[in-house]
Each structure stands twice: as structure tokens, then as C-alpha cells.
């Protein structure tokens, strides 16, 4: 495993880039830090969706795992006062991963629109429970207390900022490694021709199930990070179908080109929304929706392909 | 007994509403293979257009029954105008794309239309109660109910019958079913598929708008009021089988009745049941209760 | 173990909602046999292949591999036991290069996919892929994306990927359909040579009687889901029933399968793949 | 080559952010002839029309007047501690998490000096922790859940609006006094903090005030903004209870009234609405007569035509002149919050003898008592952070000569009559039978 990672350039540049970001982050105004945090946190979920997308599957229900992650943190905080970042992440990813594992047994048989619809249904079931049960905070949700690291409570958000960046970097590298292995290569293979994969002697269902669990765990981590960065969870901005929509939106906007793309996409989305909301409080959805259409029409392979193109042009001209 | 009647009628009312909203969605999916998230926006637009027309008529002190005319005109207008624009300008360029990607595009359209509503109609809610008030109430099962909700049921029946008749008994209906069966071949046979698509989409949008327009008098028509409808109608359509009209009818009835039972017996399950049923049906019968089950793809 | 025939099919039947696609089929094939399957379209050739390789579950009957019951197993398990197949319409990974195609195939084949957890580009896998490409004479196309290949090369790749798992029994579904006349014999020479030296039992569906005559030890003639003749080619191709129902009276030794048989074959898979 | 590119992208990104960072740090305005204040209310969504916009208007009117020094005496001094306020109006819609993000943006990006607003109890509960974390003075104007200060004391968060306890107890007192023979009651409330608390305290108060009264076993808690209530209305109609209590607000109250009205609901049931006055205005003549209506304080419907208070008269006239409609509850509540901020600033400035720091303002605001457009306000609870004031109820009717909705049998209950003393939890106080209540 290690020598693959060492030999892989993307991994190196990812680590380097995130490192630079972490350092410069210290000098950024807090609102930029916040938007970066939110963007990165969302990026984690998008990374998982990207893995699914490469096999040709788009889930309209990943808010389920995003929400599970977020609520795992909130509930553990409320009832057991758990504030340690590692515990929180472990709980969030564990629960999300486990639920993903269970639902995976059903979902792995589904494709295209049916896959999308069934995952939507599952996520809405959770939503229906959350908004109606007072013990789960109903539509108010809960606020989440500050995060501690092995007993030490940092006074500035910068520490969490770094934590999120580390988490993002690590998961980006893991996924990169995963895509490098035979299993990873299988993602495209399955999208191309499931029949052949089966006849080569590999269970497509199993491969998809595995990817699904990965994406669920990542979405869980994403939700947990979001909860910690925001200090608040609630169903409408964590579990409702619009959240799944947003995640898919970012996935398509970022494009499947690279494991870095999701994080760029997430950050771009955060800033897009912040400014749209500031410039046109009455029409910010219009701006966001317009961008979505534009991307689908003119950049089917997402922002990453755009960056790629720019770079290629630069390269050829110089 | 009293309770049973009430639950049944509440369920029926809600089911009729759901059916009118969902049938457009299912038709569009059946023919164009598009899962149209923007359907919720048509619903909202229909409601706004109708509410606007009705309140205007009321200010002009026209007779109250004019309100009903407004409802249908508004629905038709929204269907034709928005439906045409969206199909011609955006969707027709996407039919080659992957189903889910188109669905995402319609999500974008939905976001846009939502805000355009704000820009056109403002943020203040509209109250177009005249048509509902006009019809008054009758006592049924020990409590009094509004006659309007019964006309809603009637409308649902008319729509259902209309769709069935239109698809099975008319030339256009036959064309459509041919196109559903095989797009390429029908093109080869010289059917103007793109025209069929346009007309079907307009009808679908119109039905969505009609749903909104007809319930407008019972609600405060306010911003952001198409959002919940989308997933509800998804649930209905999926339960019945995407693309199946009788399916939409059964789906609507199931969701409507179940929700009514929940509200009366255990309110906290009200939302849960709807999607639990949706998931359950998808698990047991992915193509829904009515669409024919397809062969395994692997 | 090897006492039992490589492949033994007993009273195999298959019917789709009333229509009988296979009726009491009995076949035995020893190690190294090369068997040609002929028959008009819809005679049940592909259904037969699909049942042996687990794509279709038989309605009744039994399939044995070296005496081991493999009736109705999943395709991947058929591959694991050593029964592999190729397809009428080549089933390859269209967006990948020839080498990548083979690398994935090898990674999966290698010790039941444990190789999947490391990079499929490991030197030994790459070397093996190159060896395969040499054997199947597609090394010139090593880095060409599959979707850009000619039918013939794609067929070879398809077959090569089927062979990767070192099958003992290999079913080739119309290896030469849709291939230009020039390529036909080239392909068959390559394939049969490669398989003979491995001692693989081969059953292949074929429309071109010349190919059948040239390569097979035995012919199975299908008609309406039944085997109407099981004999060496010389004998079989003279059999009146075969001439009547399979070849047609205008049987000329250098008959070229017409375009429509090829296309029909293509549609054939669409209907059940 | 591709990897090369990845590297390039990242490097440029890194550089860009570094530059951005360099540019943006040190961007904190110190000039205090103007102060920037975030004013948050629903600008979109179903709550915008009936609550957000009237609230925003109320704030706008007062801010304008204060900047010009046009408020009636004694408030006719110019500005906030001399500074003119530059308000940033933002939208409260879109869910708590989005609001928290927006709050951070206002504080950290727009560098506001304080925040005023928030209508939904959900928002208030979500914002309070952030306000504490960022130590940003925040004056909540409308939201009503008592949890805000009962769960924990806040250092920089204030609320100039009495909480659901007062509203509910007042409702219960009014019902037991006006309709002593209506013994059974049920309720329909939104399923979140505000709705849950309103129902909880109303039924607790009823138990104490009229032990013979009986709550229904099946009160309804629909999701906020559901809009369709025909099934709920049936349930309530089937219920034998004579009284129906509701804390519905935003678009929901209108929708409910419309759907219930046609079914003669208000003839069969005595309807108690804690905060539905916005519907009385939006539905006008259409609104059913004989509904027990609250306004969460001495304003809106109940005091509209009561010309006894100079401040109230000025406010009603100025508001009507500027916006062409009568001010509703939210207008008063936002105006009150802005006024409170001005008083705090002025007082702090007077004490400090210079432009006050936030700590000085907070100190000045603590426990302040002042006369607002709707009656007097005492910051008595939550360590001087939570307001108490009188709350009134009346019965809706249509005023023929004024051609406007109005209320009869209006009764007000003094702050001390409907609120627990400082330091006692409302639930405990009710359980003990409201000792020391001065009515």
C-alpha cells in the first residue's frame, strides 16, 4: 500500500496542497476559514458520491448518511457529553458505515433511477422521523458544543479547520489508493460492462456494496465535520432531500476527474452560495440553479475538466 | 364508525390532491423518461397564478364562480407557457443524457422557477378562499366537511378518466403509446416524436399546475410551497410504478389513507409512513405496483 | 476425477413462458474436444451456451463438469470452476485500452481476486497481459481504447479475456460473426492454436460451415431446441436432416454467412443479455 | 503531465488563498460615527408576509427615526450613542444550520456591531450558542420559547419579548375568567420548541387555574409550514373538547383558519389563538368573529385604536403613514428591540463618558426597565436578559365604522401575574400553583 502511495504523484500534490492551505488558513479572516471548513466538510461526502458516480450510480439520498453523521455527533454530545473529535468521527462514520452496510444489501441490486429513488426514500424515512419526534429535536434539531482534542479544548476554530483539512487529505489519499487498486479499476469496468465483470468471476453486487459503504462512511464523516464546524444540526439543512440534491449538485459541478475535485467543488459551492445569498437574498436559489444548469450543459465533466483545459492550453502555449 | 368515515374521507381528499399533482409527473416519466423535479415548481406556479387571478376577480367584484374559471385558465396558461419554454429551451437538448443527470437538471430548473415566483408575485401570501367559501359545507359522519374537497375528488376522477380515455381511445393516445413502446421505431415510422414529447410535457406541466391551482383556495399561497410536494408526488409515483396512471391512482390512495390514519391514530408517524411505504414497495417490487416487472439486467 | 467427461449435459430443458427453447439436450465432451454448434437462428444455440455458463437457469435437467453438478450456478461461479465463454457481441470494457481490459481480467482471475487489493499494474500482471496479447496477436493494439478497435480485434480481446481464467471448458458464441471474411480464418487459427496447446475443451457456435469443417472434431446440429445430429463434421454435414433444417439445400462448401445472419446473431444477444 | 497539472492547480490555489488572506486581515472598521447592525427576519418563505416583512418595517421605521432624532420625547436624541445605524437586513429562512452560517458571515465577514431580530424559536435556540461563542451582542426580538434562558444563562444574548410562559398563562387565565364553563380543551401546535412549549404551559396553567378542566388525549402537532390541515381539522372536530388552543403563526394560521372556517369549525369550537393576529389583518372581514386572540403583548390588534399612550399613537400613525397598513405584533416587537438597543447605547455612553464598548452596553442593557411603543418592559428574568411585560387577550370582531378588524372584552394581565419570579423555572412555579403572582 505505502509504496503505491509514495509512487503516486496526485497523492503527493494533494498532501502538499492541503498543507499549504492549512498554513495559509491561519492568516485568513474567520469567515473565509468557515467557508473553507464547510466546503471541505461537504467535499468529504462528495468524494464518496464521486466513487459511486464512477460506477454509474447517483444517489439522491446521501443526506441520510450526512444526517446520521451529524446527529450522531449531536446526540452523543447531548446525552453523553462526548466532545472529543476522534470519538465523534468514530461514532459518526461507524453508525453511517453500519447503516450503509445494512441498506447496501438491498441497494446493491438497484441501478440508475431506481437506485436514486430508493436511496431518496430511505433518507426521507429518517427525515420523517426526525421532524416528528420531540426527543430527536423535531424541526429545531440541537446545538453542538465545542469540539475537544484528547481533552484539550482549543479556543479558536483554526484547530478544527486543520482537523478537517487533515481528514480531507487522508480520505482523499485513501480513495486515490483505492482507485489505484484492482477494486478501484473495477469501478469503471462495472460502469462499462457488468456482464463481463460477472463472467470474469467477480461479483458486481459485492463491488458496488463495498463502494456504497465507503461513500456512506465518508458522508457520515462529512456530516460530523459539518455539525462540529457549525455547532448546530437540524433536519431541514442536514437530512431533507434538498441536501442530497446539493451534494449531487456539487459532485456534478466538481466532476469525476480527480480526488481533489470534490473539495474544490465543495469550496466553490460554499462561496457561490454565500455571495449569491449576500448579493440577492431574494434570488440566491436562482443563481445557484442557473450555475447548475450551466455546468450540466457546458461542463459535463465538471470544473475539474475546465481547470484541466486551462492548464493544457497554458502548457501548449508556453 | 364515525371515525372510520372521517379517516376515509380525509384520506380520499388528500389522495385526490396527490393524484392530480402526481399524474402529470408519471405521464412525463412514462413518455419522456424524465423524472421531473421541476414538477413542484409547476405546482407552485399554478397555485400562484390561480390565487392571483381569483383575488383579482374578487377585487373587481366579479361573481364568485368566476374563481373556478380562473383556476382552470391559470393551470392551462402555466402548463402551456412554462411547459413549452422548458421543454423546447432546455430539456429537448438533454434527452440523450443519463436519466439521473436530467433529473438533476430539472432540480436546477426548480430552484430557478422558485425564485422567479418571488420576483413576479412578491413575498406576501395570497388568500383566494372565494371558490371554497362559495360552496359551503355539509355534515358527514357527525362532523361538517367543506364541499370543495368533494369537488376535488370529482376533479381527480375526471382527470383519471380523461387520461385513460385520452391514451386508449384517441389517435394521439395511440401515437403516444407507440412512442412509449419504442422511440426509434416510431421515428422511423414517421411519427413526429419531438412534437409528441412537447405535447406530453405540456400536459404534464398543466396537470401539475392544475393540482396547485385547485388547492390554492384552501391554502395561504406563500413562497417555498412546492418543495414538500415534490417528494410526496415522487413517493406516489414510485409506489404505483413510474409511468403508470392507474399506479399513480393506487399510490395516491395508499399514501392518502395511510396518512389520514396516522394523523388520527399516531400523529408522530404522519410523514414516516409515506416514505416507509415508498421504500417498502421499492424493495419488494422495484418497478412499482403497476409497471410490469423487467427481466434481470445482469 | 478425469474419468468423468469434462462436460456432461443430461436432459437439459428450458422454456420461456411456454415456448420451449431447449428440449432434452444430452451432450458429452471429453478433455480437449473441439465441438462445433450449428443451427438456424432461434434454434437454441445461444440458450444452450447461456445455460451451461449460468446466465440462464435450466427448467429441468443437469449439467456436470468433471462429474461435478454445476446446474444453474451463477456465471462467476461457472468461471471459478473453469467454464468460461465469449459472446456474440464482444463484451469488453469499451472505455479502456486493450491492456487495461486484460489487466482487470487477470487481477480478478489471480487467486480469486485477492490481487484486487493491490495495483493491477504490478509488473507480473503486466507481463502476463503482454504474453496474452502476443498469443492472440493483438499486441499492436495494446494501448488502443476498445471502442476504437475493429470487430475482429475486439472479438479476439473478448475471447482472450474469457481465457484469462484458464478455463477447462470454453464456449465461444459465434467467434467470427460480424467479422470481415479476411479476418475469419486468421482469428480461428489464432484461437484454436492457443486453446489446443492448453488442452481446453471448446464448444463454439458457428454459421460458417467451412470453419466448422476446418476446425471441429464433432458437430452438434440444433433445430427447434433439440439436437438433431451429433457426429463428426464430414458425416454431419451430409446428414439430410441437417441439410434440410440447418444448412439449406444450396449448401456450397465455401458458403459465406450472409450479413443478416450476423445481424440476427447480434439481435440474438440483445434479446437475452 | 496530468499530475504536473494537479500540482500547478494546487500551488496557484495556495498562493491565491495566501494573497486573499493577506488582503483580508486587518479589515475591521473602527470608525464609530456609524454602527453596522444585522437585522434578521424572514424575507422569503411562508413567514415573510405575515411576520418577517412587518417586523423589518417596524425596525426600518424606528432606525430611520432614531438616526434623524425624530422619535417623540424622551427618546428624541439623535442616533445610537450618537452614531447613526447602518442596518444589514438578512433573511431568516432556510433552516437553522444555514442561519448559523449566515450569523457567522454577518459577524466575521460584514463585521456588524450587533444583531437584532429572529422570529422563530428554532432560530433563537440555534443562534444563542453561536452568539456566546463569538461574544456578539444579540437582541432577540420575537421568538418565544422559554428554553432560551431557562436552559442556561447567556452573557451577550437579550430578548425584549416575553416568552411562551406568559402568553400561555395569560391565555389560561383569560379562558377561566371569560368562559368558566368550558372545561375540556385540545390543541393544534407546530411541532417545534414554540408549539411544544405553548401547549405544555397552557395545559399546566389550566390544571392549576381550573382543576376541573380536562385536556384532550390527542392534541395535534403538525410540522411547521405543512399548509394542509383537513385531516387535523377532522381530528379536532371529532374530539369532544370545547376549546382548541393554538400557537400557530406564519402562513400556517391563515391556512388553518381558511380550511377550518368553511367547515364551520369556529361555530362548534372556542378557538384560542396565542399569536394569530396577523391572520386577523390579512383575512380582514373574512376572519371569524368570537375567536379568543392574543398579540403577545399590548400591541397590534388589541391596542390599535386605544389612543391613551402617546408612544403607541405615534407608532401607529407613523407606521400607517409610511406603509399604508396598521402595524402588527412583529412591527412593535422589532421596533421595541431597536429602541432597547438605542437606550442601552445611550446609557452606556453616558456612564462611560465616551463611545461605549460592547461590555459597557451589555452592562447597561442588563435588567433595564423602559417604556416601549407597547407598554413598559422589564428585563427581569434570565439574569436581566429576558423581558417580561403585560400580555392581553381579546375576542375578535369586525368594527363597522372603522371598516377594520378589532377586539372586544380586551383583558391585560400584568407581567408579575403571568411570569415566575427570577430564579424559578416556569414549570416548577406552575407546579407550586404560581406563588406570589400579582394580578
Image (cartoon, coloured by chain):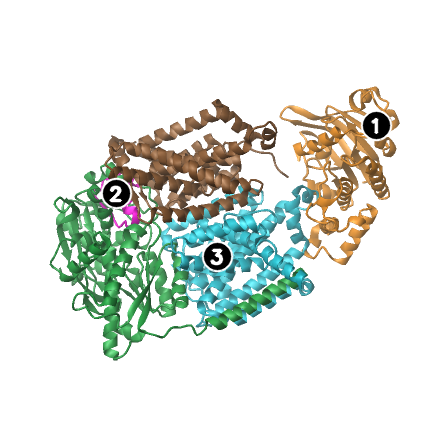
Chain colours: A cyan, B brown, C orange, D green
Residue closest to the eye, B76 or A32: B76
Query: From this viewpoint, is residue D384 visible?
Result: no
The chain that hosts pointer 3 is A
* CB-based contact (under 8 Å), mark 3 and mark 2: no
Q: Quadrant of residue D257?
A: top left
Distance from disc 3 to disc 2, alpha carbons, whole Å, reads 39 Å
- Marked residue chain, label 1: C
Q: Would you name the residue on which mark 2 appears?
A: D257
Which region shows up in magenta?
D230-257
Residue D65 at least partly seen: yes
Same chain for labels 3 and 2? Say yes or no: no
| Secondary structure found at label 1 | loop
Q: Position of residue C28 (x, y in %)?
A: 80, 32
* Residue D125 image position (x, y, % from top left): 34, 60
Residue that mark 1 sits on: C255
What residue is disc 3 on? A69
Label 3: state its secondary structure: helix
Amino acid at each position: 500500500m505505502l509504496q503505491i502511495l509514495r509512487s503516486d504523484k496526485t497523492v503527493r500534490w494533494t498532501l502538499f496542497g492541503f498543507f499549504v492551505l492549512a498554513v495559509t488558513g491561519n492568516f485568513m479572516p474567520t469567515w473565509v476559514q468557515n467557508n473553507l471548513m464547510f466546503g471541505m466538510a461537504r467535499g468529504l461526502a462528495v468524494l464518496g458520491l464521486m466513487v459511486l458516480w464512477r460506477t454509474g450510480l447517483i444517489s439522491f439520498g446521501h443526506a441520510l448518511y450526512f444526517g446520521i453523521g451529524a446527529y450522531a455527533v449531536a446526540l452523543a454530545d447531548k446525552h453523553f457529553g462526548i466532545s472529543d473529535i476522534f470519538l465523534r468521527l468514530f461514532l459518526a462514520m461507524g453508525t453511517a458505515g453500519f447503516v450503509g452496510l445494512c441498506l447496501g444489501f438491498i441497494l446493491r441490486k438497484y441501478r440508475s433511477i431506481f437506485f436514486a429513488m430508493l436511496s431518496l426514500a430511505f433518507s426521507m424515512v429518517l427525515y420523517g422521523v426526525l421532524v416528528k419526534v420531540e426527543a430527536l429535536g423535531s424541526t429545531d434539531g440541537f446545538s453542538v458544543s465545542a469540539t475537544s482534542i484528547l481533552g484539550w479544548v482549543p479556543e479558536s476554530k483554526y484547530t478544527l479547520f486543520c482537523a478537517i483539512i487533515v481528514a480531507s487529505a487522508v480520505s482523499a489519499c485513501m480513495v486515490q489508493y483505492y482507485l489505484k487498486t484492482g477494486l478501484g479499476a473495477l469501478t469503471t469496468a462495472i460502469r462499462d460492462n457488468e456482464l463481463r465483470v460477472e463472467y470474469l468471476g467477480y461479483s458486481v453486487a459485492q463491488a458496488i456494496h463495498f463502494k456504497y459503504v465507503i461513500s456512506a462512511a465518508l458522508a457520515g464523516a462529512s456530516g460530523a465535520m459539518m455539525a462540529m464546524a457549525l455547532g448546530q444540526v437540524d433536519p431541514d439543512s442536514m437530512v431533507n432531500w434538498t441536501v442530497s440534491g446539493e451534494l449531487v449538485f456539487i459532485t456534478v459541478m466538481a466532476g469525476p476527474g480527480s480526488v481533489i475535485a470534490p473539495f474544490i467543488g465543495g469550496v466553490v459551492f460554499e462561496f457561490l452560495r454565500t455571495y449569491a445569498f449576500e448579493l440577492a437574498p431574494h434570488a440566491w436559489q436562482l443563481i445557484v440553479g442557473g450555475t447548475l444548469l450551466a455546468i450540466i450543459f457546458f461542463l459535463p465533466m465538471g470544473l475539474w475538466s475546465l481547470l484541466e483545459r486551462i492548464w493544457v492550453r497554458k502548457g501548449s502555449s508556453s | 364508525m364515525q371515525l372510520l368515515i372521517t379517516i376515509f374521507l380525509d384520506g380520499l381528499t388528500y389522495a385526490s390532491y396527490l393524484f392530480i399533482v402526481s399524474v402529470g409527473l408519471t405521464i412525463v416519466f412514462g413518455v419522456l423518461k424524465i423524472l421531473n423535479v421541476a414538477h413542484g415548481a409547476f405546482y407552485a406556479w399554478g397555485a400562484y397564478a390561480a390565487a392571483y387571478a381569483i383575488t383579482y376577480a374578487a377585487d373587481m367584484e366579479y361573481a364568485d364562480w368566476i374563481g373556478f374559471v380562473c383556476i382552470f385558465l391559470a393551470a392551462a396558461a402555466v402548463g402551456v407557457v412554462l411547459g413549452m419554454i422548458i421543454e423546447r429551451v432546455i430539456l429537448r437538448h438533454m434527452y440523450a443524457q443519463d436519466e439521473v443527470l436530467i433529473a438533476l437538471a430539472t432540480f436546477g430548473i426548480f430552484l430557478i422557477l422558485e425564485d422567479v415566483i418571488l420576483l413576479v408575485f412578491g413575498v406576501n401570501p395570497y388568500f383566494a378562499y372565494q371558490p371554497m367559501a362559495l360552496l359551503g359545507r355539509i355534515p358527514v359522519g357527525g362532523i361538517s366537511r367543506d364541499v370543495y374537497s368533494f369537488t376535488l375528488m370529482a376533479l381527480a376522477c375526471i382527470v383519471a378518466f380523461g387520461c385513460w380515455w385520452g391514451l386508449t381511445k384517441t389517435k394521439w393516445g395511440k401515437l403516444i403509446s407507440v412512442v412509449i413502446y419504442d422511440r426509434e421505431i416510431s421515428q422511423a415510422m414517421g411519427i413526429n416524436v419531438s412534437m409528441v414529447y412537447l405535447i406530453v410535457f405540456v400536459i404534464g406541466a398543466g396537470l401539475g399546475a392544475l393540482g396547485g391551482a385547485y388547492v390554492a383556495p384552501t391554502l395561504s399561497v406563500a413562497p417555498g410551497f412546492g418543495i414538500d410536494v415534490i417528494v410526496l408526488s415522487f413517493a406516489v409515483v414510485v409506489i404505483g410504478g413510474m409511468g403508470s396512471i392507474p399506479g399513480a391512482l393506487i399510490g395516491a390512495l395508499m399514501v392518502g389513507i395511510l396518512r389520514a390514519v396516522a394523523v388520527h391514530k399516531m400523529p408522530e408517524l404522519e410523514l414516516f409512513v409515506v416514505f416507509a411505504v415508498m421504500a417498502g414497495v421499492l424493495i419488494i417490487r422495484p418497478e412499482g405496483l403497476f409497471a410490469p416487472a423487467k427481466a434481470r439486467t445482469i | 476425477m478425469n474419468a468423468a467427461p469434462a462436460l456432461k449435459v443430461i436432459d437439459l430443458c428450458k422454456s420461456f413462458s411456454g415456448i420451449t427453447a431447449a428440449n432434452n439436450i444430452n451432450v458429452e465432451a471429453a478433455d480437449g474436444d473441439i465441438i462445433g454448434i450449428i443451427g438456424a437462428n432461434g434454434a437454441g444455440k445461444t440458450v444452450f451456451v447461456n445455460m451451461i455458463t449460468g446466465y440462464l437457469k435450466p427448467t429441468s435437467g443437469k449439467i456436470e463438469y468433471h462429474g461435478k453438478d454445476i446446474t444453474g450456478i451463477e456465471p462467476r461461479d461457472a468461471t471459478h470452476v473453469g467454464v468460461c465463454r465469449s459472446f456474440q457481441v464482444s463484451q469488453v470494457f469499451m472505455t479502456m485500452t486493450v491492456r487495461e481490459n486484460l489487466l482487470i481480467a487477470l487481477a480478478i482471475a489471480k487467486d480469486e481476486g485477492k490481487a484486487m487489493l493491490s495495483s493491477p499494474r504490478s509488473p507480473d500482471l503486466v507481463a502476463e497481459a503482454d504474453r496474452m496479447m502476443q498469443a492472440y496477436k493483438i499486441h499492436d493494439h495494446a494501448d488502443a481504447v476498445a471502442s476504437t478497435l475493429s470487430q475482429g480485434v475486439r472479438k479476439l480481446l473478448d475471447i482472450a479475456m474469457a481465457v484469462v481464467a484458464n478455463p477447462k471448458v470454453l464456449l465461444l458464441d459465434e467467434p467470427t460473426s460480424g467479422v470481415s471474411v479476411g479476418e475469419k480464418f486468421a482469428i480461428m487459427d489464432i484461437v484454436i492454436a492457443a486453446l489446443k496447446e492448453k488442452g481446453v475443451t471448446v464448444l463454439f457456435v458457428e454459421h460458417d460451415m467451412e470453419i466448422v469443417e476446418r476446425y471441429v472434431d464433432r458437430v452438434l446440429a440444433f433445430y427447434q431446441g433439440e439436437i438433431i445430429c451429433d457426429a463428426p463434421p464430414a458425416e454431419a454435414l451430409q446428414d439430410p436432416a441437417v441439410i434440410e433444417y440447418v444448412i439449406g439445400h444450396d449448401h456450397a462448401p465455401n458458403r459465406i454467412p450472409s450479413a443478416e445472419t450476423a445481424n440476427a446473431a447480434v439481435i440474438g444477444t440483445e434479446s437475452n443479455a | 503531465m496530468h499530475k504536473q497539472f494537479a500540482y500547478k492547480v494546487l500551488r496557484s490555489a495556495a498562493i491565491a488563498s495566501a494573497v486573499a488572506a493577506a488582503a483580508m486581515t486587518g479589515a475591521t472598521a473602527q470608525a464609530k460615527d456609524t454602527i453596522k447592525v444585522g437585522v434578521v427576519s424572514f424575507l422569503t418563505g411562508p413567514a415573510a408576509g405575515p411576520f418577517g416583512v412587518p417586523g423589518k418595517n417596524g425596525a426600518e421605521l424606528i432606525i430611520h427615526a432614531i438616526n434623524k432624532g425624530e422619535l417623540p420625547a424622551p427618546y428624541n436624541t439623535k442616533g445610537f450613542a450618537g452614531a447613526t445605524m447602518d442596518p444589514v437586513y438578512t433573511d431568516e429562512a432556510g433552516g437553522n444550520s444555514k442561519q448559523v452560517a449566515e450569523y457567522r458571515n454577518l459577524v466575521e465577514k460584514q463585521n456588524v456591531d450587533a444583531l437584532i431580530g429572529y422570529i422563530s424559536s428554532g432560530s433563537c435556540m440555534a443562534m444563542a450558542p453561536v452568539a456566546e461563542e463569538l461574544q456578539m451582542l444579540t437582541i432577540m426580538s420575537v421568538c418565544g420559547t422559554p428554553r432560551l434562558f431557562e436552559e442556561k444563562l447567556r452573557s451577550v444574548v437579550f430578548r425584549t419579548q416575553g416568552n411562551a410562559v406568559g402568553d400561555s398563562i395569560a391565555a389560561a387565565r383569560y379562558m377561566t375568567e371569560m368562559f368558566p364553563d368550558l372545561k375540556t380543551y385540545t390543541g393544534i401546535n407546530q411541532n417545534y420548541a414554540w408549539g411544544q412549549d405553548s401547549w405544555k404551559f397552557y395545559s399546566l396553567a389550566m390544571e392549576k387555574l381550573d382543576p376541573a378542566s380536562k385536556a384532550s388525549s390527542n392534541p395535534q402537532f403538525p410540522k411547521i409550514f405543512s399548509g394542509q390541515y383537513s385531516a387535523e381539522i377532522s381530528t379536532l372536530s371529532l374530539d369532544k373538547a370545547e376549546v382548541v388552543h393554538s400557537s400557530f403563526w406564519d402562513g400556517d394560521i391563515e391556512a388553518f383558519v381558511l380550511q377550518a372556517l368553511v367547515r364551520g369549525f369556529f361555530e362548534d369550537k372556542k378557538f384560542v389563538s396565542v399569536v394569530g393576529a396577523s391572520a386577523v389583518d390579512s383575512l380582514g372581514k373574512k376572519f371569524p368573529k368570537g375567536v379568543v386572540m392574543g398579540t403577545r403583548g399590548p400591541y397590534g390588534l388589541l391596542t390599535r385604536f386605544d389612543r391613551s399612550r402617546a408612544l403607541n399613537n405615534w407608532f401607529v400613525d407613523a407606521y400607517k403613514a409610511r406603509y399604508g397598513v396598521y402595524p402588527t405584533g412583529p412591527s412593535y416587537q422589532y421596533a421595541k428591540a431597536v429602541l432597547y438597543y438605542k437606550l442601552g447605547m445611550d446609557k452606556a455612553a453616558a456612564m462611560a463618558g465616551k463611545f461605549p464598548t460592547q461590555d459597557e452596553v451589555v452592562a447597561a442593557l442588563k435588567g433595564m426597565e423602559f417604556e416601549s411603543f407597547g407598554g413598559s418592559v422589564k428585563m427581569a428574568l434570565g439574569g436581566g436578559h429576558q423581558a417580561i411585560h403585560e400580555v392581553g387577550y381579546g375576542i375578535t370582531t369586525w368594527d363597522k365604522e372603522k371598516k377594520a378588524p378589532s377586539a372586544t372584552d380586551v383583558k391585560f394581565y400584568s407581567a408579575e401575574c403571568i411570569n415566575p419570579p427570577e430564579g424559578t423555572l416556569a414549570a416548577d412555579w406552575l407546579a407550586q400553583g404560581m406563588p406570589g403572582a400579582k394580578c
